[in-house]
Amino acid sequence: MAERSSKIPVLALLAVVFTLSLTFATLELPRILNRLLIPLFPDIYWEPESIEALMRYARPIGYASLAVIIALIVLGFAKEKNTLSYLGSFAFFIPAFGYFAASMFFLAGIGILRIMWLPFWDSNPAFLKLGDAAYIPYWILVYPLRFLLDPRTAHRAGGLIASLAVGAGLAVFFAGTLTWFYGRLEGRKVFDFWIYKHSRHPQYLGYVLWSYGVMVHTKLSPVPFGGYQPEPSLPWLISALLVVCVSLSEEVSMLRLEDEAYATYRRNTPFMLPLPRFLSRPLAAPGRALLKKGFPENGREILYIFSVYCVIFILISALILGAGWIQAV
């Protein structure tokens, strides 16, 4: 026991390295990548002929890129390779990183990564706002500040909340990674200690919190005169729901390996975010009503879960947009 405890600092160091790597990717890699890409994809001012020429060139690449990501996600679920599905969902959200290097045109520099969103843009630019229901937790925190602070200070407070979400995601990711390392060291098959006592999927929870902060920062980022910032809410919503599906798929696999032990752990531990019952029960109600049971047991049922929640959040977003309700600060 003492020997294992002495290895905790080493494991903590490894977890810190993993977390710092994610922090570096969040803050620095977008700027580096933008510097590399801006000579290849320079700013284009809003000259109709230049824009249309670029769009004609970029459109087939955008559709192909989206098709590849969808194929990656589907293949991951079909072959039970959850890493592939997670990478696909992460790749779908990557274009939001463009806010770290705002450009005059949304396909300039790192903005070229948004090329995979062109199929949505071609349909209707407002289509990407059909994930705006995702802003509801942020609105709940920020809008009361409008009555206490001047608009500029309230806007800065919104940015602080977004940064706190990013920081919370990194902290949860660190705690989950450290716990996972220690569990592997001990040879445990079911991790039910430390942060895993409060969340069955802390690393994925860390990603959801971190990416939520990135999404809000993207929404709040000023765009230079003449520029355009594609709405990040629908891509984030789809990415987050896919991560939930990856988590559910992993649970199905765990039940096959450690049936009773993992089933007991699943019954006694929150899925991702430890919420009070009055919040967690309504959130889980659509899935329970659809499946007539507490948890999905195969890939088809996980697809049902994804579909029903996607429809629910899109409908809520459509109501928000149609009614002209509150918008992000």
Image: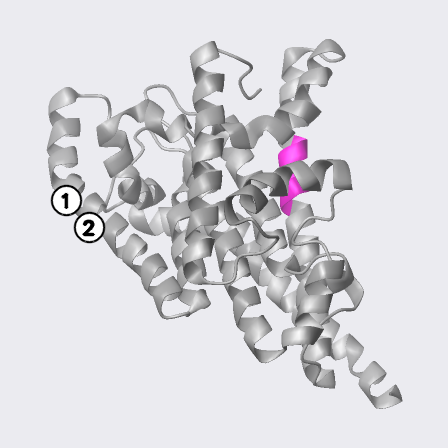
* Protein image colouring: one colour
Residue topped by disc 2: 64
Tag count? 2
Q: Is 11 on the left or on the right of 44, as rendered?
A: right
Give the percent coordinates (x, y) of residue 301. 45, 55
- Label 1, label 2: how far apart the Cα atoms are: 6 Å
Question: Looking at the image, which residue is at 27% across and 31% down?
Answer: 121
The magenta stretch spans residue 163: yes
Q: Is residue 230 visible?
A: no
Give the percent coordinates (x, y) of residue 114. 32, 41
Q: Is 86 on the left or on the right of 147, as rendered?
A: left
Query: Are discs 1 and 2 less than 8 Å apart at CB?
Result: yes
Q: What is the quadrant of residue 217 in the picture?
A: top right
User: Taking 41 as reference, is 207 above or below it?
Assistant: below
Q: Is residue 72 visible?
A: yes
For the C terminus, which image quadrant?
A: top right
Question: Looking at the image, which residue is at 63% across and 23% down?
Answer: 139
| SS assignment for the magenta stretch, majority | helix
Of all residues, the one furthest to the front in this rendering is 292
The crowding category of the residue bearing disc 2, from other C-alpha atoms within 10 Å (few below 14, some 14 to 19, many at least 20), is some
Question: Looking at the image, which residue is at 66% across and 67% down?
Answer: 177
63, 222: nearer the viewer:
63
Q: Secondary structure at mark 2?
A: helix
User: Residues in magenta?
Assistant: 160-166
Q: Is 12 on the left or on the right of 329, as rendered?
A: right
Give the percent coordinates (x, y) of residue 200. 67, 60
221, 281: nearer the viewer:
281
Give the percent coordinates (x, y) of residue 141. 70, 26
Residue type highlighted by circle 1? Pro
Q: Secondary structure at mark 1?
A: helix
Q: What is the quadrant of residue 87 in the picture?
A: bottom left
Residue topped by disc 1: 60
